[in-house]
Image (cartoon, helix red, strand yellow):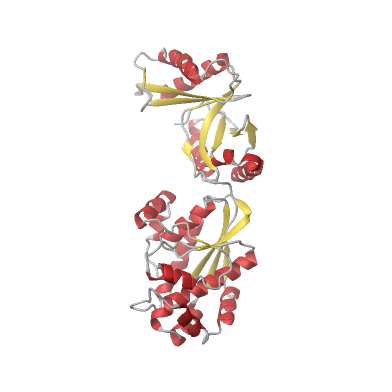
């Protein structure tokens, strides 16, 4: 249960504090992202260098579920390291002590089996008369009087009270929801993310989102050879990633079937997958140009499949002018799976679906394709017409 003494939500950030003269710009972006998550139900204000959101009413059992939902939403905003329900008082010991005691009293009421506690004071205001350890001792002495069985445990306490003494305010809290860290999203830093429906690409998209990039999702399908289920699945994945964006997102559903047929009829069977990927990159780049995106993002991990050898990746990106970001390039599959589970995309990703790249796929694909041979085969294809026909036929979904 959340503490009924909470009057605000404290928004902690981490990396933004290291941005020097650019810090105000990153704080502006973070405040804007947080404000969008509130949907007009509250405002984000700066309190002694921290962002806080005032709660409209004290926390009650009726409002707790809705508040927890809001906390989870705010914790998914890029740049947020933690969200904590808190109370705010003047930075004076005689104001901090009774508020801290009342806060812990509520905590004990919610958890009567608690036997140990710890006080963690962070003194940003160096003019405060006591240092952190002295403040801990003063508050701790009062708290021990609340319950005879309470004892101090600094390593693994049942209850932990955090006190931040800042220049104009003191913030008191005991529990926090960990955030995604990173940087706040900037809608001008748009990237095109290739979303396949597998485990890797949603994780790669998330990684660039938490670094401040605004994604445009692109998914390739082979309808009617592949079913509507694959599109339903990727739409669900994109919607799950939307939870980590304060802004609406786009999903482009691009038909690849005509390109696959052309490649099947004109090119070496072992080169089909490489050709598919080269066309995907060209199409993604054209969508990026139309949407003002600055880079392409893929879920490739080195050596994971035939198209992801160093040689084939070099052949696939040949002729692409935009940077290609590969956030997962050196990660083991187990690490990617764990991250997908954390994001909540894993269960969706493992749902069965027909993979576009499998259509007409060779039994023994080339792992070391020669660029000269690939270019020669492409000379037999109307590449320009195929790319623009696919882009023009794409369906755009707003999330």
Residue visible at 52% across and 44% down in the picture = 73
Above or below, comparing residue 125 to residue 182 in the picture: above
Residue visible at 49% across and 53% down in the picture = 207
- Quarter that holds the N terminus: top left
Judge whether residue 90 can be spotted in this image.
yes
Residue 268 lies, in percent from the top left, at: 41, 84
Nearer-the-camera pick, 394 or 206: 206
Above or below, comparing residue 385 to residue 338 in the picture: below
Residue visible at 54% across and 50% down in the picture = 211
Residue 241 lies, in percent from the top left, at: 50, 54
Above or below, comparing residue 337 to residue 131 in the picture: below
Residue visible at 63% across and 41% down in the picture = 23
Q: Quadrant of residue 303?
A: bottom left
Residue 345 lies, in percent from the top left, at: 43, 55
Above or below, comparing residue 320 to residue 333 in the picture: below
Residue 127 lies, in percent from the top left, at: 60, 19
Q: In which quarter of the image is residue 150?
A: top left
């Amino acid at each position: 249960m959340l503490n009924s003494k909470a009057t605000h939500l404290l928004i902690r950030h981490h990396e933004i504090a290291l941005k020097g003269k650019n810090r105000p710009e990153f704080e502006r972006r973070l405040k804007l992202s947080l404000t969008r998550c509130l949907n007009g139900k509250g405002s984000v204000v700066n309190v002694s260098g921290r962002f806080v959101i005032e709660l409209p009413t004290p926390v009650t059992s009726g409002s707790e579920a809705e508040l927890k939902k809001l906390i989870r939403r705010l914790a998914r905003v890029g740049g947020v390291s933690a969200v904590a329900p808190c109370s705010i008082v003047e930075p004076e010991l005689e104001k901090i002590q009774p508020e801290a005691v009342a806060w812990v009293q509520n905590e004990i009421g919610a958890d009567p089996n608690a036997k140990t506690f710890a006080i963690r004071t962070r003194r940003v205001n160096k003019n405060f008369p006591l240092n952190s350890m002295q403040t801990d001792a003063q508050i701790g002495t009062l708290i021990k009087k609340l319950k005879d069985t309470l004892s101090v445990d600094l390593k693994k306490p049942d209850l932990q009270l955090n006190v931040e003494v800042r220049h104009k305010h003191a913030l008191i809290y005991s529990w926090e929801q960990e955030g995604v860290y990173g940087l706040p999203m900037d809608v001008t830093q748009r990237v095109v993310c290739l979303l396949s429906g597998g485990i890797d690409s949603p994780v790669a998209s998330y990684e660039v989102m938490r670094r401040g990039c605004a994604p445009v999702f692109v998914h390739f399908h082979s309808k009617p050879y592949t079913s509507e289920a694959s599109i339903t699945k990727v739409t669900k994945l994109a919607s799950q990633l939307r939870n980590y964006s304060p802004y609406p997102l786009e999903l482009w559903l691009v038909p690849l079937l005509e390109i696959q047929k052309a490649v099947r009829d004109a090119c070496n069977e072992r080169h089909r997958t490489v050709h598919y990927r080269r066309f995907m990159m060209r199409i993604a780049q054209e969508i990026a140009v139309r949407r003002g995106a600055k880079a392409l993002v893929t879920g490739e991990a080195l050596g994971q499949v035939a198209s992801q050898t160093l040689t084939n990746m070099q052949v696939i990106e040949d002729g692409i002018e935009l940077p290609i970001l590969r956030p997962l390039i050196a990660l083991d599959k187990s690490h990617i799976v764990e991250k997908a589970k954390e994001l909540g995309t894993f269960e969706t990703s493992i749902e069965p679906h027909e993979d576009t790249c499998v259509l007409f796929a060779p039994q023994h694909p080339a792992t070391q394709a020669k660029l000269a041979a690939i270019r020669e085969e492409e000379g037999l294809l109307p590449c320009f017409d195929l790319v623009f026909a696919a882009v023009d036929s794409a369906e755009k979904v707003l999330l």
